[in-house]
Amino acid sequence: MAASPSSVILGRIAGAHGVKGWVKVFSETQPRQNILSYSPCLVQVAGAWHEMDVLDGRLQGQAVVAQLKGCDDRDQALALKGAVVAVERGQLPAAATGEYYWADLEGLEVITETGVILGEVDHLLETGANDVLVLKPTTGSIDEQERLIPFIREQVIRRIDLDAGQIIVDWDPTYLV
């Protein structure tokens, strides 16, 4: 099975939990335990995608632990360490108006209000104070610098146009972080 272009990465398996095949999961969902809500999920092992049902799971301290169908002992759980966990986009609830999944923002071109191309969203970082867009340079970018732009609606992020594939920002193109 191959993950489709519409699949969305939700986290990865960080290791084994116990001896009965449970796995520790690094979740990128909010709240963290929401990753347990998606079954089946897609798990990438050694470059190949496998559909796996989530049988059980819970928060365990700061971690999420899960029991996956077909993962019955510690050795099988350890073999999944580092595996990416994804779901098909259709499994996610629709984002509310004005809200976006990070996956929707990745790949968008970032342009200043004056038309200067700053780059493309490579990924986002969660910093606590606010999320940050990490831009990689693209053809037409003002320079070859990676940029970090705070994801602060209205103050910095002026408009997000998913159809046009653009984020319009109020940002000085000479400012590098």
Image: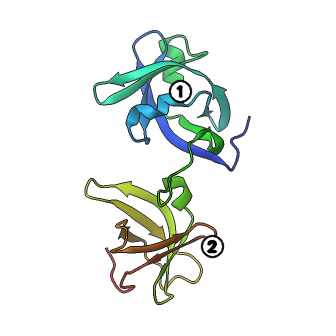
Numbered disc total: 2
Identify the secondary structure beneath mark 2.
Answer: loop
Disc nearest the viewer among 1 and 2: 2
Residue carrying label 1: 80
- Callout 2: few (<14), some (14-19), or many (20+) C-alpha neighbours within 10 Å? few
Determine the residue positioned at 51% across, 15% down.
Answer: 75
Residue carrying label 2: 164
The residues bearing labels 1 and 2 have C-alpha atoms spaced at a distance of 38 Å
- Callout 1: few (<14), some (14-19), or many (20+) C-alpha neighbours within 10 Å? many
**Residue 81 seen:** no
Say what amino acid the circle numbered 1 marks: Leu
The quarter in which the N terminus is drawn is top right
Rendering quarter of residue 147: bottom left
The residue nearer to you, when weighing 143 against 89, is 89
Residue pushed farthest bottom?
Answer: 114
Identify the secondary structure beneath mark 1.
Answer: loop
The quarter in which the C terminus is drawn is bottom left
The residue nearer to you, when weighing 52 against 17, is 52
Decide if residue 173 is on the left or right side of residue 80: left
